[in-house]
Image (spheres, helix red, strand yellow):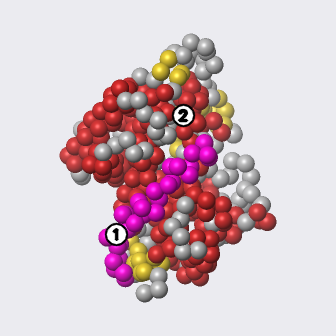
């Protein structure tokens, strides 16, 4: 009765075509079947193998005691981890760097562009020329990678290789149909763009908000430091540490509740239907807000309080449908495990070296943010631990 639709998704399709995140229902099941193996839990250790290295690169510019705009730095880290998972070590370093930079530039401006109605396409927001140049380079780079991948016999365990080898039923066919064919270059390009643009800013925003909340609660931050020190034992963080970072995991869960990555989601009614006491005509756009849902006092006592312990097993779990940072059911985000794994390991690597304090010269970021994604410029004052 409801399908992906609304102004946001219409503008998104201009960038990523019918990629998994925005494709209509008739295409979703088949795409999900093809892509799901790339996001299986057993692939996470390989995807996160260079997390400590990426964090070291991304935080190299931080100075002890000096304010830092952590949002942009975290997005650069997240983008590099994602690019590495997508293309493994098959890319020359200059091309890897260029793709990461262009993806960061595009994502920094894409949300505001998607909020501009289609009929107002003539509007050129600030930074439009830089955005268009980065987007054109990104498109050219990805198309070249797909073309080269067709002629290269590779055993890499990355998303690109899986897409190149994927088999799917013909367009419009049932996913279980026997007659299968490979994905076209355009279909692969759409999926690469989808994950590149949808998978970095949301995770970066979650990590930035988590550090912001920890900066506001020094005692809680110290507890997280103690857990990380105990679990890591002075070693670089790896995927094997993930299961033991329990408090940090609850910090991520609470951050996703209080600052849901996509706080407003739209759908389009495919038939005349009824929602609660309201009649919804076919073609109408409806919206739901994870932000509003996550701040209901009847579901989350003292909802404005950042309380990771509300996710202790002894406290129970929210009712079905009450916690939607990654949506739900068939259209639940395919990268939810990837995102939470990345956020936990990146924050562990950062908090091994740094502690954070609020910047008294900066106003509190807006809640909810202005835009479709829960990302806001967050400036904190990092200090080296032990300094």
Q: Position of residue 355 (x, y in %)?
A: 47, 78
Report the residue marked by disc 1: 60
Residue density around tag 1, few if under 14, some if 14–19, many if 20 or more, within 10 Å: few
Magenta residues (range): 40-69
Q: Secondary structure at mark 1?
A: loop
Q: Is residue 54 above or below residue 219?
A: above
In the rendering, which numbered label is found on residue 35? 2
To which quarter of the image does residue 32 belong?
Answer: top right
Q: Residue furthest bottom?
A: 387
Q: Are marks 2 and 1 in contact (CB under 8 Å)?
A: no
Q: Tell me if I can see residue 6 in this picture.
A: no
Report, in whole angstroms, how far the alpha carbon at label 2 lies from the one at label 1: 34 Å
The residue lying toward the viewer, choosing from 171 and 359, is 171
To which quarter of the image does residue 300 belong?
Answer: bottom right
Residue sitting at 47 percent across and 21 percent down?
Answer: 182
Q: Secondary structure at mark 2?
A: helix
Q: Position of residue 366 (x, y in %)?
A: 44, 65
Residue sitting at 46 percent across and 46 percent down?
Answer: 85
In the rendering, which numbered label is found on residue 246? none
């Amino acid at each position: 009765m409801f399908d992906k639709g609304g102004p946001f998704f219409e503008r998104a399709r201009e960038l990523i075509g019918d990629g998994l995140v925005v494709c209509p229902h008739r295409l979703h099941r088949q795409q999900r079947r093809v892509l799901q193996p790339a996001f299986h839990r057993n692939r996470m250790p390989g995807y996160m193998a260079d997390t400590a290295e990426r964090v070291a690169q991304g935080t190299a510019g931080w100075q002890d005691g000096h304010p830092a705009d952590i949002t942009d730095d975290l997005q650069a880290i997240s983008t590099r981890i994602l690019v590495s998972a997508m293309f493994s070590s098959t890319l020359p370093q200059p091309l890897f760097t260029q793709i990461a930079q262009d993806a960061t530039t595009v994502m920094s401006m894409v949300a505001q562009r998607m909020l501009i109605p289609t009929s107002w396409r003539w509007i050129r927001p600030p930074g439009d020329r830089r955005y268009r140049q980065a987007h054109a380079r990104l498109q050219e780079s990805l198309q070249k990678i797909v073309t080269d991948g067709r002629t290269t016999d590779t055993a890499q365990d990355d998303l690109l290789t899986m897409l190149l080898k994927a088999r799917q039923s013909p367009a419009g066919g049932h996913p279980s149909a026997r007659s299968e064919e490979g994905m076209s270059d355009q279909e692969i390009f759409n999926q690469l763009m989808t994950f590149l643009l949808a998978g970095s800013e949301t995770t970066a925003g979650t990590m930035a908000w988590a550090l912001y909340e920890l900066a506001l609660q020094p005692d809680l931050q110290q507890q997280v430091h103690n857990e990380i020190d105990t679990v890591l034992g002075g070693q670089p963080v790896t995927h094997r540490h993930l299961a033991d970072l329990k408090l940090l995991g609850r910090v991520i869960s609470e951050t996703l509740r209080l600052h849901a990555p996509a706080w407003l989601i739209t759908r389009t009614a495919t038939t005349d239907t009824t929602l609660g006491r309201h009649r919804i005509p076919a073609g109408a756009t409806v919206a739901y807000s994870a932000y509003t849902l996550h701040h209901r006092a009847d579901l989350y006592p003292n909802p404005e309080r950042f309380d990771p312990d509300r996710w202790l097993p002894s406290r129970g779990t929210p009712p079905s449908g009450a916690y939607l940072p990654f949506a739900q059911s068939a259209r639940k985000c395919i990268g939810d495990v990837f995102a939470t794994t990345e956020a936990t390991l990146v924050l562990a690597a950062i908090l091994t070296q740094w502690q954070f304090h609020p910047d008294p010269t900066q106003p509190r970021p807006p809640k909810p943010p202005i835009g479709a994604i829960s990302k806001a410029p967050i400036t904190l004052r990092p200090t080296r631990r032990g300094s």
